[in-house]
Image: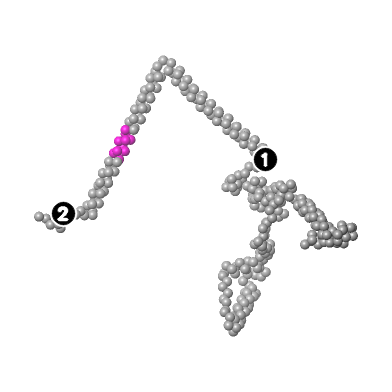
Amino acid sequence: MKSFKHFQEDIEISGKKYNDMVSKRQMRDKKDDRKEVDTEFNKSDKIERMKMRKTRRKVYEDYDSPFSADKFKNKVQSKLDSKEAAREAAKEREEEKEQMKKEIKRELGVREVYDPEVQSRSQIRKTGEGGMVGRDRKKSEPEKRRMKAVGGGKTAPVEYKRRSDVGKQRQSSDRVQAPTKERGSAEVKQSYADKVKAERKKAAQARIAAKKSGEQVKKTTTSKKDTEKQASKLLSTKKPEKKVDPGYKPQKASGYTRQERMKITRKGETMLKGIMKDQENAKYKKETGRSPDSEAKRKVIIPRVQRRMST
């Protein structure tokens, strides 16, 4: 009788043999799948061919029968007529659509706005219009966002003025300070060396003074980028930007012009002045027990009202 070890050796399969078996099985499965697909395709192709034969036979039978030629011609002509009619109807619909678009544009009076992608292309926006150096960047009516008051609580888009320097090239010498001496000259090198030497001497004196007083010596950690920014600021002739208060809130647009706003303000001040006059008259009457005369109004009531209005 075989032992378990001998039995195990008999049933063991090597890796190579196993791979060969798997690949053979896969190839057989693929072959079967391909056969199945070919069978299905041949079957469907056969059915289609049978249908086509039947149709062709029917057409030929109709054509061979009496008056079949006239019928065939009439059928073809009716099909052509229907296609022509459909084409004409489609053309009429397109014309109606175009007409409606034109009427809507005429009624609204709005300029045609292109897609931003299309609008930026060179074939639509030309350079040099009106003596300009670059392309025309003026905004169209729908693009304008800045509004102004036109009176009666209404606003309208602001009309932009043309720049006074249209057609002129902006020179860099107007914006950046040009060097006054030749690059790499001995004077420039000496002046720069003296400046660096003075700065180092000053920093060393500050460090010595800090050590003597027992304070902590602070090192200046200025990067190259910060130095370049500072140099650009010093060389530039442009005006520095004004700082804006972080708590600033812009006034909401009322739609009234300056004259209308002043008129409303004066009207309110007149009404307030009248209320204060009545209050001061009542106060004077309570204090003195009689109504104020012209002198009391001039010397007492009017100065009081003016003082209250000014505060």
Specify start and end residues of the magenta stretch as a single range.
34-43
Q: Quadrant of the N terminus?
A: bottom left
In the rendered structure, which disc, 1 or 2, sits on the residue that comes first in sequence? 2
Closest to the observer: 60 or 282? 282
> Which residue is at the far left?
1
Badge 2 marks a residue whose secondary structure is helix
The amino acid sitting under disc 2 is: Asp
**Is residue 252 positioned above or below 216 on the image?**
above
Secondary structure beneath label 1: loop
Instruction: Find out whether residue 64 is within the magenta segment.
Output: no
109 or 122: which is nearer to us?
A: 109
The residue that appears at 80% across and 57% down in the rendered structure is 279
User: Which residue is farthest top?
Assistant: 66
1 over 66 or under it: above or below? below
| Left or right: residue 68 compared with residue 137 | left
Say what amino acid the circle numbered 1 marks: Gly
x and y percent of residue 5 in the render? 15, 58
Residue 39, magenta (yes or no): yes
Q: Which mark is residue 10?
A: 2
Task: Residue 143: tell me if it is visible.
Answer: yes
Left or right of 286 in this view: 71: left
Q: Nearer the viewer, residue 201 or 256?
A: 256
Indicate the colouring scheme.
one colour
- Say which quadrant the C terminus sits in: bottom right
Give x and y (percent) for residue 99: 62, 33
Q: What label sits on residue 109 in the rendered view?
A: 1
Q: Residues within 10 Å of mark 1 (few under 14, many from 20)?
A: few
Q: Is residue 238 visible?
A: no
